Image (cartoon, rainbow, N blue to C red):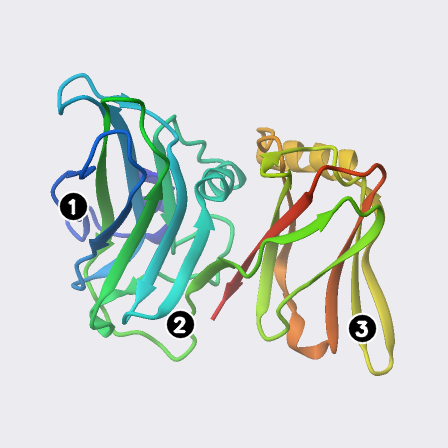
Amino acid sequence: MSLFTLQKQKAIEPEELMPRPACLEKASDAAATAQTFDIDIPTDHFIHSILISIAESTATAGQVLADDLTDISLILNGNNYVKSMTGGMCKAISIMNKNVMSTGYYMLYFTDPKIQKAKPLPAWLFSSIVLRLVDNAPAAGDKHFINVTLFESAGREISGDWALLIEKYLRWKKYGTDTLWQDYDHERAYNVFGYLYTVDDDGALSDTEFDKLRIIARTKEGEKRIFNETRMTHIKEQDKVEYQNALPIGFFAVEFPSGLLTAKYTSLTSQLNIPTAATNAGLRVLERYCL
C-alpha cells in the first residue's frame, strides 16, 4: 500500500513512519549479463513493505525502467525464506491489493491491505535479513540499476498473536504433454489466505493450458470440494471484478478472506484440467499464509 494509505489504515503518526533507502544504488557487475543481487536489509524497525525499482542503461544517466526481475526472495537469519516468488507473482500481488505498480517497480508486503492478520516484520529480532533479487540479462551494452526503499515504523512490543505474511511457491510442476485432470498438492500446516497460480507452456505464460479448477480437501471422514470444476475463464473474470484490474496472462488467484485452516485436512490438492496437449504445461502456486 502507499505511504499515505499505510498511515491512515494503521494509525501511524507521520514522524513514526520512516521511508528510507535500504542501500546505495546497485549496478550490474557486467553489461548484458544476468546476475543475483544480495542486498542486506537494516534490522532496526518494523518493516511494513519493501519497494524495489529496476532500470537499465549503459550508465547511471538515461535509465529506462523495465520489469526485468525474474525472482525475488527475502531471507531471515540466512536460511528462513519468508518471501520466495517470481517477479511476475510480485507484480500480480500488487494488482490483487489494488496497488498496480508501474513498469520497473515491485512491492513486497508484510502489512497487507487485504489480510488484516498480517503484521509488520519486527526486523530487530533477526541477525540478518537479505533481499535476494535475480534479473534477466539486460540489453547489449546495458547494466541494471536497482534501488530499494523500506517503509518502516518505530518498534513497539509485539504480542503473542503476532503473525507474519509468508509468500512462497514450493515447486514448479511440469505435466509435459499430459491431458485431463492433473494434481498439484499444497502444504497443510497453515492458515492460508490465498493461492496465486502461475501457468505456462514450456516457460511461456498462458491462459489456455488449463480450462477448469477443482480444489479437493480430504479428511479421514470424507472429502470436500472447495472448488468444483469451475471454469478458468470465470475465475479470471471474478478476479478482474474483485481487483478492478485483470491479472496478467498466465495468472489467476483464489482467495480465502477469513483464512483456510489447512492443518485439519489429510490432503489438500488443486486439480486442473488440460483440455489439449501442450508442449510442456507448467504450474507454480504461490501460497499466502500467516505464521
Q: In the picture, residue 182 is in which quadrant?
A: bottom right
Q: Which mark is residue 20?
A: 1
Q: Residue at the location (37% across, 36% down)?
A: 136
Of circles 3 and 1, the one toward us is 3
Left/right of residue 41 with respect to residue 261 in the rendered view: left
Q: Mark 2 = which residue? A: 162
Query: Under tag 2, what secondary structure?
Result: loop
x, y percent for residue 194:
60, 55
Distance in Å between CA atoms under marks 3 and 1:
47 Å
Q: Helix, strand or loop at disc 3?
A: strand
In percent of width and height, residue 225 lies at: 84, 61
Q: Earlier in the sequence, mark 3 or mark 2?
A: 2
Question: How many C-alpha atoms fall within 10 Å of the one at disc 2: few (<14), some, or many (≥20)?
Answer: some
Seen at 24% across and 24% down, the residue is 142
- Vertical arrangement, residue 233 with respect to residue 16, above or below: above
The residue depicted at 24 percent of the width and 74 percent of the height is 125
Of the two numbered discs 3 and 1 on the same chain, state the one appearing first in sequence. Answer: 1
Q: Is residue 3 visible?
A: no
Three-letter code for the amino acid on which mark 2 is drawn: Trp
Location of the N terminus (image quadrant): top left
Type of amino acid under label 3:
Arg
Q: Which residue is mark 3?
A: 218
Q: Residues within 10 Å of mark 3 (few under 14, many from 20)?
A: some
